[in-house]
Amino acid sequence: MPPATPPQDRLRLAVQKSGRLSSDSLDLLTRCGIKVKAPKERLLLHSENFPLDLLFVRDDDIPQLVMDGVCDLGIVGTNVLEETALERRNNGAGTGYVTERDLEFGACRLAIALPEERAYSSAADLAGVRIATSYPRLTQRFLTERGVTAEVVMLSGSVEIAPRLGLAEAICDLVASGSTLEANKLRAVETIFRSTAVLIRGARDLNPAKQHVLEILLRRIDGVQLASEAKYIMLHAPKAALEEIKRLLPGSENPTILPLAGDDSRVALHAVCQEAVFWETMESLKRVGATSILVLPIEKMML
Ligand code: ATP
Ligand code: ZN
């Protein structure tokens, strides 16, 4: 057993307790080789094989916890992050944080939506309109940038039913597929912000031990992200077609070429492709003479 890391040298990461970001956040840690044994009912969990502790909270609290230095790191959507930063700036509170990585999950957009039958051609049509939202500062920033004066009302949940209840004429809410809007007879007319989950850390310096752990964590995240796109491709090819085949392989450099026992005219080629390998690519490879084409997922990668 390695010696236990003292508590002051363990990184503390805030993640959403239960919601749309929870399973992707935990999956990422698992793919980084960091074991955290549920039960999630606990507020704080210690990883057994990495000096990382997880704090399970509501996503809305994550930016504050990081900006106030209660947690070293947080995984949160940029929608919540930017709204909190604007709020704290308005209140004169510190907003120090650094975005370490875009994690590419939790993608959604914040959109202004109107009842389907209402005409809309530009932001000027929002003048004097009452807009319900859980993101009043992002909404107000959009209106101010467009020089539009409208009334923004804060609602913390079920924003999409506000027009039906007569609470507002428009809403500004998160949209992924648009089906919630459709069910409420609303139509998105402006996208005001695009969000994905990010890993943030506080702006203050970490102690050297924590900084070291953070660097290991970031390198592992990079490895996971590289591997998630990349594929390992193996094929047999006529020597004469090698140049053509290399050109067809997306994002691969310096493939390995191996002789084939008992066949001088053909070789085996192994390559890591940094981009997706589509059926069309495989068909093109086949056309120039490649055979036995295998495309394998890559679990981990370190360059
Ligand atoms: P909590 O109880 O933690 O406050 P919540 O209800 O505010 O949860 P969720 O609905 O779980 O939050 O969404 C968390 C985050 O997931 C959002 O802030 C956003 O960044 C992201 N997200 C991704 N897709 C969507 C979507 N279709 N609708 C809403 N949020 C989405
Ligand atoms: Zn929330």
Image (cartoon, grey):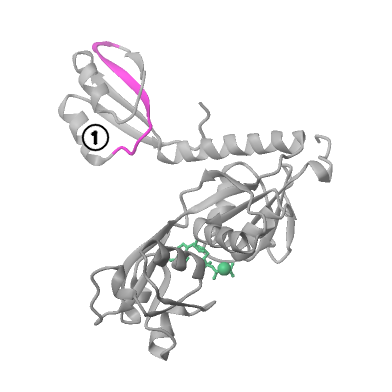
- Magenta highlight: main SS: strand
Q: Residues within 10 Å of mark 1 (few under 14, many from 20)?
A: some
Image quarter where the N terminus lies is: top right
| Residue behind label 1 places its C-beta within 8 angstroms of ligand 1 | no
The residue sitting at the bottom extreme is 165
Q: Position of residue 192 (x, y in %)?
A: 39, 62
Q: Disc 1 marks which amino acid?
A: Met
Taking the image as shown, residue 18 lies to the left or right of residue 144, namely right
Where residue 19 sits, quadrant-wise, is bottom right
Q: Which residues are magenta?
A: 262-277
In the rendered image, residue 205, in percent from the top left (x then y), is placed at: 71, 39
Q: Height in image: 103 above or below 1?
A: below
Visible residue check, residue 175: no
**Observer able to see residue 151:** yes
Compare residues 106 and 87 and report the one nearer the observer. 87
Which one is nearer the viewer's eye here, 253 or 239?
253
For disc 1, the marked residue is 282
Residue located 45% across and 63% down the image: 141
